[in-house]
Image (cartoon, rainbow, N blue to C red):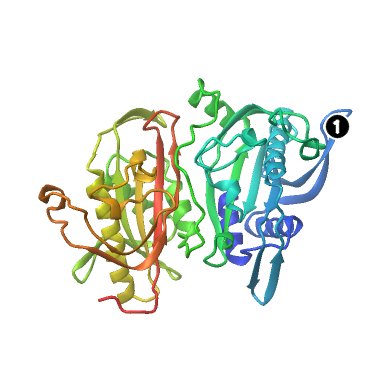
Amino acid sequence: MNIQAALDSLARKRPIFHNEADLQHALAWELRGLYECKIRLERRMEIDLKRRTYLDMLIEIDGKRITIELKYKMRAVEHTFDEETFILLNQGAQDIGRYDVLKDLQRLEQMVKLNLVDEGYLIYLTNDPSYYLDPGVEKLTVDREFRIHEGRQISGILSWAENTGEGTMKMREEPLDIEGTYIMSWLPYSQLNSSVTGSIKSLIIPVNLEDRERNRRLYPEIKEPLEVHNPTTIIEEEKTECSMEINSIIKSLDVIPLSQFDLRDKLGASLKMAGYQVQINRDFGKAKIDIYAENKNDQLAIEVRYKTALLKTIFNGNHTELKNQAAQDISRYDFLKDLEKLETVIAQRPGTKGYAVLITNDRSYWEKTKRVTSVDEDFRIHQDRLIQGQLSWKNASGGTTHNRESMIVLKGQYHLDWQSFKILGTGKNEIFKMLVVEVISRGENIP
């Protein structure tokens, strides 16, 4: 049973829900439609003689017992879909919300440990960026240990700060004991509109004994959360979200690519497995696109970049050695040049969607630099950067700009949102992130 695939399928039919119960019933119907399984909602379960609980969803399939816990916390938003209007109020109380999410995670661990179920999944949907965005600085909030933003590592004893008010902790006083190790990885669920609250994100945390043992081997020394790095700012501008399917396909690559060509070919192979007809290095007039993929519903033009920092590691039993490619200023220019090229191609082929993809383990791409000015200032692509308009070098030398002298002109507006690709550990170059920017037709011809 592929929970991510089921959620992706549901998003196309139900991009928004009235409340958590609405989500619960919709997901149950989706799973029943996709898999031959038996589903019970609000199934009572005896943990021991003194404790009982009610499971949001208990699934029996192929002799396996799977439980799903759901959370749905939203900021105020109004949306009409399929002639049905959804008016959601601001739920707030994010500190309590974070605690409740991890309380469910602790309960899932207990259920698996006691062999009451074989697997558990925590599914959380929200349009509130305060849950999934890295705050960027160490804020001494009362719920600091319960943060669940992108890239955060969850493990061990988690408690409220000493100065937490009794009202906040009421009925939630007990610390949480998370036995496993989990890395928070958020994906787009649906895009309702261009506002911040119009973007719904999903978090899926699988719980089983096999994964817990694997994570224990991967992170034997880690006791503290991942170091916080890049500051983020919520920008109330148009935010172009990339396709959920493309994100899922990229993240499903169970390898550390050896080169840019290797990434291109493996992504092309995964698209074929997903039912696409794929052409590598497809010509569009004077432009050449790395991957062109099409099926009966989609036509995709994809440009791929892969930039590495020095790393020697073993991943899935394979020895991997990556070189330090450096020249980040040139690489940033090339990535944005890909965006410009995709805009031209998409304008010529209405209905085609373009994607500029960059995967890297070099933090200098996604972290905001402290330098006030640099020769590639216009081309910076750090987290939450808004890219648009005319972009050019600032007093760069001829060696830097050789064959890259021309200004980049972007017709669209792009809010950059980096996501996790692979996390091997917390070493300097052991975190891989991906930037996937969607280019869509804007109803105009680009010369």
146 relative position to 301: left or right: right
Q: Position of residue 82 (x, y in %)?
A: 64, 75
10 relative position to 265: left or right: right
Q: Nearer the viewer, residue 51 or 272?
A: 51
Q: Picture quarter containing residue 173?
A: top right
Q: Position of residue 65 (x, y in %)?
A: 71, 40
Residue bearing mark 1: 51
Look at 40% across and 54% down and name the residue there.
Answer: 385
Judged from this view, the residue extending furthest toward the top is 221
Q: Which amino acid is tagged 1? A: Arg
Label 1 SS: loop
271 relative position to 290: left or right: right
Judged from this view, the residue extending furthest toward the front is 372
Judged from this view, the residue extending furthest toward the right is 49
405 relative position to 79: left or right: left
Neighbourhood count class around disc 1 (C-alpha, 10 Å): few under 14, some 14–19, many 20 upward: few
Q: Picture quarter containing residue 99?
A: top right
Q: Picture quarter containing residue 413?
A: bottom left
Q: Nearer the viewer, residue 385 or 431?
A: 385
Look at 71% across and 28% down and name the residue there.
Answer: 162
Look at 48% across and 47% down and name the residue there.
Answer: 232
* Residue 220, above or below 194: above
Q: Position of residue 188 (x, y in %)?
A: 53, 55
Tell me the quadrant of the picture where the C terminus can be found: bottom left
Q: Nearer the viewer, residue 40 or 15?
A: 15
Q: Position of residue 429 (x, y in %)?
A: 36, 32
Q: Nearer the viewer, residue 68 or 221?
A: 221
* Residue 113, above or below 187: above
Look at 76% across and 56% down and name the residue there.
Answer: 21
On the question of residue 380 being in view, the answer is: yes
